[in-house]
Image (cartoon, rainbow, N blue to C red):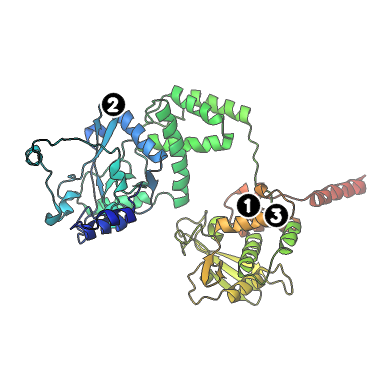
């Protein structure tokens, strides 16, 4: 729980350190000298936090509890100093996690604390001088009170640990009640000063895309919670315990999801230098049985068909900048087969002009619009750019080029690096986020009598590809337009009954001619 500024403002009214304390409560306290420029450094954990320590399992459990409680959340900001972690047993059977700010020597957090801010603890002798006849002494222990004290943004980047729970790469944990920060990065570099070590850290942290890290983090939390609940060491895990985890997952997941959740178990062991525990006949037989029992029935989102698109348009208010923006996004999604990761940003804070569609990516021409994409699910390494043409359909409300032009006129902006789908709401410029888009879509679908839960932004990708197939376009062109790397695009195609009837009719006519 964060400190309440107003309450402390009243409490510290006459305190000589009022300005300093209130500033820290509001903006966070500086652990290091705010003018310091710390170098990147890291250090191995103390023996008490190593896998062979008797406290290892309890430390893992404690960290997992902190993650589950939301005290540590993932951040994508690379840390500066990664301090070693120590573990001390507590009388109640638990453990205390120690953030050792004195290591690595010469580059530690303590080395960047200014002399004027260093303080000494009061001794028992000092306390005894305050006690006189008739005085009473008492001790108050506020459990986890330190979590209420915030630290500054700059200091957060130097208060980082390497948790003992795994050698899992590319994850940062930042304390939600900002005090303790955790950075998971496999084994720490031996040299603390070599410039290449920093480069290694940077390269390792970019091994996975941000969306992949978030997905793996979900898998990681599930596995660690299971291990914690059953007092199991995550690495190395025995075949028997892994089999139990598979059985646990089979009670709540589909088979394809179950296999995805197990991917993190493989990565954990490979990062720790251990064999992949999935590579055994025992585990293979369990997975084979799970596949037979659970089946592989998938329930993809239904496609947005042309008929549905027509009905949605009947609900659109073209005098509303919000609806103009929404309709333009609908048509671009339908004709481009774009993934949501390209089309819409999750928020202003997560908008990335290198990944999400910007106005600068859209060029108008005589034949319509050309949209240039430099990043996608299949373009992760800047190896190519993708140009997607959208048609010009004169005098049609279903023309994506006209819809985009109307959007840009209703919400003009001189900065070309802004998101493509923004709209004016009174005096503010609002971003058409994925959540806002889906919420509006489902509102209209519910109004039209459809089950909104069966549709998402992905429904446009599937609907557009299916319509292209019904128009007689070759599958390879559909695959190119949708930027599918493999034949998985075929699972998106959903030919209508009338289209299937054409196949049956054609076969029947051919048979009649032959016979």
| Residue to which mark 3 is pinned | 445
* Residue 403 picture quarter: bottom right
| Residue to which mark 1 is pinned | 456
Horizontal and vertical percent for residue 498? 82, 51
Q: Residue furthest front?
A: 134
Quick check: 398 left or right of 240?
right
Please report whichever mark, 2 or 3, sits nearer to the chain's N-terminal start.
2
Please give the name of the residue rendered at 17% of the width and 49% of the height, measured from the top-left corner: 110
- Name the mark nearer the viewer: 2 or 1: 2
* Label 3 crowd (10 A; few <14 / some 14-19 / many >=20): many
Residue 358 seen in the figure: no
Please give the name of the residue rendered at 92% of the width and 49% of the height, measured from the top-left corner: 513
Q: Secondary structure at mark 1?
A: loop
Q: Are the residues at dot 2 and dot 1 in contact (C-beta closer than 8 Å)?
A: no
Q: CA distance from mark 2 to mark 1?
A: 50 Å
Please give the name of the residue rendered at 56% of the width and 30% of the height, measured from the top-left corner: 250
- Name the mark nearer the viewer: 2 or 3: 2
Q: CA distance from mark 2 to mark 3?
A: 56 Å
Q: Is residue 150 above or below residue 56?
A: below
| Residue to which mark 2 is pinned | 92
């Amino acid at each position: 729980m964060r400190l309440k500024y107003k309450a402390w403002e009243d409490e510290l009214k006459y305190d000589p350190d009022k300005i300093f304390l209130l500033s820290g409560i509001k903006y966070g306290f500086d652990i290091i000298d705010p003018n310091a420029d710390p170098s990147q450094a890291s250090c191995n954990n103390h023996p008490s936090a190593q896998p062979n320590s008797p406290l290892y399992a309890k430390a893992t459990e404690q960290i997992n509890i902190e993650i589950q409680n939301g005290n540590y959340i993932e951040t994508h900001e690379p840390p500066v100093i990664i301090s070693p972690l120590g573990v001390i047993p507590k009388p109640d059977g638990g453990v205390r996690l120690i953030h050792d700010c004195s290591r690595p020597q010469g580059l530690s957090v303590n080395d960047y604390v200014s002399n004027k801010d260093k303080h000494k603890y009061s001794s028992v002798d000092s306390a005894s001088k305050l006690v006189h006849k008739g005085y009473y002494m008492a001790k108050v222990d506020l459990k986890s009170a330190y979590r209420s004290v915030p630290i500054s943004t700059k200091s957060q980047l130097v208060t980082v640990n390497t948790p003992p729970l795994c050698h899992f790469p590319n994850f940062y944990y930042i304390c939600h009640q900002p005090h303790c920060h955790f950075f998971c990065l496999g084994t720490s570099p031996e040299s603390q000063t070599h410039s290449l070590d920093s480069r290694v850290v940077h390269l390792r942290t970019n091994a996975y895309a941000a969306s992949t890290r978030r997905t793996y983090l979900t898998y990681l939390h599930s596995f660690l919670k299971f291990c914690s609940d059953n007092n199991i060491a995550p690495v190395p895990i025995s075949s028997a315990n892994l089999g139990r985890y598979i059985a646990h997952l089979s009670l709540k997941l589909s088979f394809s999801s179950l296999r995805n959740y197990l991917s993190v178990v493989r990565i954990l062991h490979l990062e720790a230098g251990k064999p992949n525990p999935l590579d055994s006949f025992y585990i293979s037989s369990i997975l084979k049985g799970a596949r037979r029992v659970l089946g592989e029935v998938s329930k993809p989102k239904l496609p947005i068909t042309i008929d549905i698109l027509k009905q949605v348009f009947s609900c659109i208010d073209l005098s509303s900048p919000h609806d103009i923006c929404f309709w333009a996004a609908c048509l671009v999604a339908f004709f481009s087969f774009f993934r949501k990761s390209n089309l819409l940003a999750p928020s202003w804070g997560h908008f990335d002009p290198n990944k999400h569609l910007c106005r600068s990516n859209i060029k108008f021409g005589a034949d319509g619009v050309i949209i240039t994409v430099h990043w996608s699910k299949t373009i992760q390494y800047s190896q190519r750019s993708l140009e997607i043409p959208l048609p010009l359909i004169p005098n049609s409300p279903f023309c994506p080029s006209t819809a985009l032009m109307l959007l840009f006129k209703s919400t003009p902006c001189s900065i070309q690096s802004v998101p493509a789908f923004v709209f004016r709401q009174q005096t503010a410029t609002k971003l058409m986020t994925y959540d806002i888009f889906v919420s509006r879509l489902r509102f209209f679908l519910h109004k039209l009598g459809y089950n909104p839960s069966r549709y998402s932004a992905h429904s446009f990708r599937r609907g557009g590809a299916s319509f292209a197939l019904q128009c007689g376009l070759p599958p390879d062109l559909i695959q190119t337009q949708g930027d599918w790397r493999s034949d998985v695009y075929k699972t998106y195609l959903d030919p209508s009954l009338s289209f299937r009837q054409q196949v049956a009719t054609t076969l029947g006519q051919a048979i009649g001619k032959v016979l």
